[in-house]
Image (cartoon, rainbow, N blue to C red):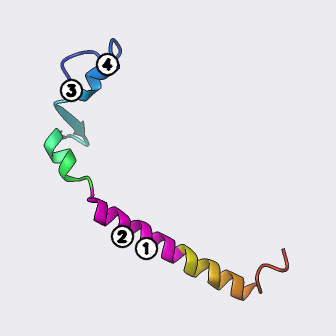
Amino acid sequence: MKENPLEDIRYTKEIDFVIKGGNIYTQEQLIEQVPSVEVLMKNIQAFIDSFEDTTIQLMSKNKGFQNI
């Protein structure tokens, strides 16, 4: 970063690299790590499916939560 983001928050858009854990990452390297929409949707669906399965199991075990 060549400018101070405390002076103007827009300077955060001009980050040249990030240092994390002693490693230097360029903007391109960071962007490569962002999952695609397809991967995100697959992960969201897997989470929903897992949640639904757990809910059905709990409802069956507790007879629809009638004892709450």
Q: Secondary structure at mark 4?
A: loop
Mark toward the start of the polypeptide (2 vs 3):
3
Q: Is residue 17 left or right of residue 67?
A: left
Picture quadrant of residue 56: bottom right
Q: Amino acid at mark 1?
A: Ala
Q: Residues within 10 Å of mark 4 (few under 14, many from 20)?
A: few
Mark toward the start of the polypeptide (1 vs 4):
4
The residue that label 2 is drawn on is: 42
Q: Residue furthest right?
A: 67
Judged by its main secondary structure, the magenta piece is: helix
Asked whether the beta carbons under mark 2 and mark 3 sit within 8 Å of each other, the answer is no
Q: Amino acid at mark 3?
A: Glu
Q: What number of labels is visible?
A: 4
Asked whether the beta carbons under mark 1 and mark 4 sit within 8 Å of each other, the answer is no
- Which residue is more in the foreground, 6 or 10? 10
> How far apart are the two marked residues, 4 and 3, measured between alpha carbons?
10 Å
The residue that label 3 is drawn on is: 14
The residue that label 4 is drawn on is: 5
The residues colored magenta run 35-50
> How far apart are the two marked residues, 2 and 3, measured between alpha carbons?
32 Å
Q: Residues within 10 Å of mark 2 (few under 14, many from 20)?
A: few
Q: Residues within 10 Å of mark 3 (few under 14, many from 20)?
A: few
Give the quadrant of the C terminus. Answer: bottom right
> How far apart are the two marked residues, 2 and 1, measured between alpha carbons?
6 Å
Residue, x 55% and y 73% (percent of image)?
Answer: 51
Rendered image: mark on residue 46? 1
Q: Secondary structure at mark 2?
A: helix
- Which residue is more in the foreground, 30 or 44? 44
Asked whether the beta carbons under mark 2 and mark 1 sit within 8 Å of each other, the answer is yes
